[in-house]
Amino acid sequence: MTAAPVTVRVPAKVNVQLAVGGRRPDGFHDLANVFLAVGLYDEVTATAGAAGEGPVITASGPDVGSIPLDATNLAAKAALALAAHHGVAPDVRLHIVKDIPVAGGMAGGSADAAAALLACDTLWGLGTPREQLLAICAELGSDVPFSLVGGAALGEGRGEILTPLEVAGPFHWVFAVADGGLSTPAVYRECDRLRQESGGGDTVADVPAPAADPALLDALRTGDPYALAAVLVNDLQAAALSLRPALAGTLATGTDAGALAALVSGSGPTCAFLAPDADTAAKIAVTLAASGTCRSARPAASPAPGAAVVRTA
Ligand code: C5P
């Protein structure tokens, strides 16, 4: 058992393919979800808490006013789940330094959960095997296992069943951060509504089973941004645009500024732009930031490593 504070760094993600199948009886959607970790990071520091106080969450960074600091924060749930798994007291102070956009479709909340899990495991000296950590991640949320793993991976089921993918790179991205977030369940509901409205139906019986695109997996493996740009796809994009029509202007601005391709990141509202190189990414970011179509624009490269302990003092 170590009493020294433990800091874990954890990346954001972008979905380079988000193929959404029909709504299942449990309300989730079957996915073929190709995750790519990107170099925007949150840090979570775990410090021993006072006996009986449970997880205590604090946070700093832009927009932390909109994240819950109580037991509903996914990082607190991660600490409670790990403590319950081992039958230890969940007393821990978790400080989150947030750089990943909040409710932005970049798995920021999931990242904090994965980071908290790893930080508590180290602080409490538990040495939980990787498979058990991944199982706890999957209980916490569909995107949480990927935040632990990083790199690139195909997520099937509701996104939690991961197969690591070979990925070269670097791929150079720009992320246009919007004012305000979008609720993931609301975006999935809108996707269902649009499918019903178009007459096709929205259940697993109506929608073809999602599958990873072999051309996209090839593009990741070879690290070719032009090939990747040609196959980027997000089945939630129409729903995100329906809820936030102004995002169409953001996407067009980045494309006009030289992006090879543009898409909404996950459930949005962050928009992702793939650039041919780092210089062009920097120029696209400047154009987007000046355009008034987003609040800020962040260049970042991928792949990035998964959650990892970076400091233990
Ligand atoms: O798993 P997670 O808690 O991140 O999911 C949040 C919400 O997103 C779910 O309650 C559900 O409404 C929606 N979702 C879905 N299908 C998935 C993943 C998430 O419908 N595969």
Image (spheres, helix red, strand yellow):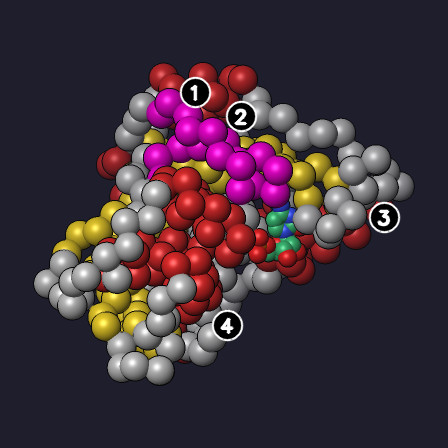
Please name the residue shown 66% across and 60% down the image: 186
Above/below status of 243 relative to 22? below
Please name the residue shown 50% across and 22% down the image: 216
User: What SS does tag 3 mark?
Assistant: helix
Which numbered disc covers residue 295?
none
- Is residue 23 left or right of 306 when viewed as pictured? right
| Residue indicated by mark 1 | 219
Which residue is more in the foreground, 47 or 19? 47
Give the mark, 3 or 4, whose residue is nearer the N terminus.
4
User: What SS does tag 1 mark?
Assistant: helix
Q: Nearer the viewer, mark 3 or mark 4?
A: 4
Q: Nearer the viewer, mark 1 or mark 4?
A: 4
Dots 2, 1 in contact, CB < 8 A: yes
Give the mark, 1 or 4, whose residue is nearer the N terminus.
4
- Say whether residue 202 is magenta: no
Specify start and end residues of the magenta stretch as a single range: 150-167
Q: Quadrant of the C terminus?
A: bottom left
Give the mark, 4 or 2, whose residue is nearer the N terminus.
4
| Residue indicated by mark 3 | 197
- Say whether residue 151 is magenta: yes
Classify mark 4: residues with Cα within 10 Å, few (<14), some (14-19) or many (20+): few
Please name the residue shown 45% across and 25% down the image: 228
Classify mark 1: residues with Cα within 10 Å, few (<14), some (14-19) or many (20+): many
Which residue is more in the foreground, 303 or 141? 141
Amino acid on which disc 3 is placed? Glu
| Residue indicated by mark 4 | 72
- Answer whether residue 77 is visible to the viewer in this image: yes
CA separation in Å, label 3 and label 4: 34 Å
Name the spot of residue 185 as percent of width and height, x first: 64, 58
Which residue is more in the foreground, 249 or 57? 57
